[in-house]
Amino acid sequence: MEASLLAALSPVILLLAFGVATAVAFRAVRLGPIVGYLVLGIVLGATGLARSSEPVALLAELGVIFLLFDVGLHFSLRHVRQQLVDVVGLGPLQVLCGTLGLGVIAMAFGLKPGAAFFVGATLALSSTAVVARLIAERHQQSCPVGQAATGILVFQDIAAIFLLVIATALGTGTPLLPALGMATGNAVASLAAAMLCARFLVQPLFDLVARSRNEEVFTAMALLIALAASWVTGTLGLSMTLGAFLGGIMLADTPYRTIIQSEVKPFRGLLLGFFFVHVGLTLQVDLLRQWWLVVIGVAILIAAAKVLLNGAASLAFRWSVPGSVQLGFLLAQGSEFALVIFTLPSVRTMVGAPQCDILIAAVVLSLGATPQLADRGRSLAGRLRRNWKRNTDAELESRDLIGPVFIVGMGPRGRAVADAMNEFDIRYAAIESDPRQLRQAIADGYHVVFGDLADPRIWEPAAMQDRRISVLTRPSFETSSGLSPVVRSYYPNLTRIAVVDDPAQAARFATIGVTPVVDSADMPGLDVAVEVLTRLGIEPSDADQWALRRRRLESMAPAPSLAAI
């Protein structure tokens, strides 16, 4: 048994060692780890240093499952409502234009219509992982171009689920149109079942787990939901990836989404790395050597066609020419979903194994070229804006969907700050680690999630990179002191405010770069709320007037009875 375990672990250890070195090297040359893992797989396959094996293949499958689970976690109905126009308008139009245009091109290269338009739909998708990271690195999350691209990617992720389900149905020999109808029916029924499970099973279950205050249980529950949902849909004859996506949807609108994202992220990143390496290992290197010029030509053709087709969809949606050009270049690459779809046996049978290998290699090249393509599109759009006669200023204005304020703790102080934000129509987010206060705040209509901001893993899911101010309503000097150097390094533009009880505490927090606010005991939260409003550009007189009205309301409120306490 020990010998078999050693044999199974050997390729995994080898891939981990090479993977770490590859990720560091490709990050240094600004190509990103995805491209590095794919190239690593090709090199390992060509040199014979590693061969695809059952353990690696299983880890690759798990990587796809966790990718789709994470996509589902981002599919919040609240998020969709905020970007409804982009998700249900521009997104479908972009996918339709890409499917028709790239499908016609595929037919010109000899594919039958069904296979050609399936390839066109797959290539119409862009890379959520690459584009989202690029938008974050360039701080474009609040600009219309970044938000439109995000909305399009949300719809594309949904379309990718349908393509995966259709591909699975095709493996059973079902014709394309019946497969599409079957996929639609199955997806709608599965989505309805997922919503019911989220409402009556998952939410109460996580409420129970939250009371235990055990992080390991959260990790186990997140893994259980992802794998169990995949197992159920796989057992029913549907795609396991559909189950993973639905598992994420079950949790997307719960207050536990943020902490689940932080728990799942390491598994997703590691296992998805195995998937990309596995894709590289399975590529036919001899074929790529023979057809390398064709691969480069196909990659250029895909990128050029997507720039034109994406730009046309944006123009039809009344974007300006500069904005359409920038969006077209930003979404010109292929998708990580294309790498999944073109490795499926049913798709390789329908399209042809050599053609799928060429398309996979071309998608890899387009992923690697994304930063350069996006730079070129941004530069060209800038020149066009300077010379464009129409007013395109609206496409440059920031549209804040994230919220500049993050409130840590939703006791009386946190609620006062949230009320002030609501009064002046300023978006905020809040986090609470106490299950009782969490339930009470949600019941009273506050937007709050479960978690502890002292855990750095939660910073990215909480979108701290987009915040201007964080308000620590129950600050711990020891915790804040230990985290201060890391916070300053990651978020140099974030202002941290600590609500304290006396000047002595204020002096201590000031020494570690945290702005202290001494809050009055009789009206908790009003002083810090006024401070936050002022820092956000609200006139001090308006902020003071709000605080005065709040004091009058508080003074008129009846004292709570002993029974209520």
Image (cartoon, rainbow, N blue to C red):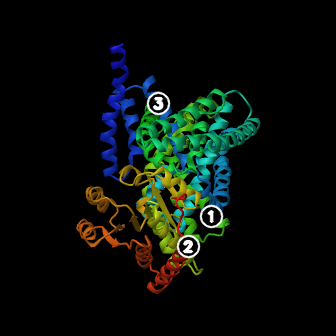
Q: Which mark is residue 293?
A: none
Q: Pointer 1: what residue?
A: 314
Question: Which numbered tag is attached to residue 557?
Answer: 2
- The residues tagged by marks 2 and 1 sit, at their Cα atoms, a distance apart of 53 Å
Q: Tell me the kind of residue under disc 3.
A: Thr
Q: Secondary structure at mark 3?
A: helix
465 or 508: which is nearer to us?
508
* Residue 305 visible in this rendered orientation of the protein: no
Q: Position of residue 34 (x, y in %)?
A: 42, 44
Q: Which corner quadrant of the image does residue 269 belong to?
A: top left
Q: Nearer the viewer, residue 535 or 389?
A: 535
Please tell me whether mark 2 or mark 1 is closer to you in this view: 2
Q: Which mark is residue 282?
A: 3
Tell me if residue 341 comes above or below residue 426 in the rendering: above
* Mark 3 / mark 1, whichever is N-terminal: 3
Q: Position of residue 188 (x, y in %)?
A: 71, 42
Rounded to the nearest angstrom, the CA distance separating label 3 from label 1 is: 37 Å
Dot 2 alpha-carbon crowd within 10 angstroms: few under 14, some 14 to 19, many 20 or more: few
Label 2 – label 3 distance at C-alpha: 70 Å
Q: Is residue 189 visible?
A: yes
CB under 8 Å between discs 3 and 1: no
Amino acid type shown at disc 2? Ala
- Which of the 4 image quadrants contains residue 229? top right
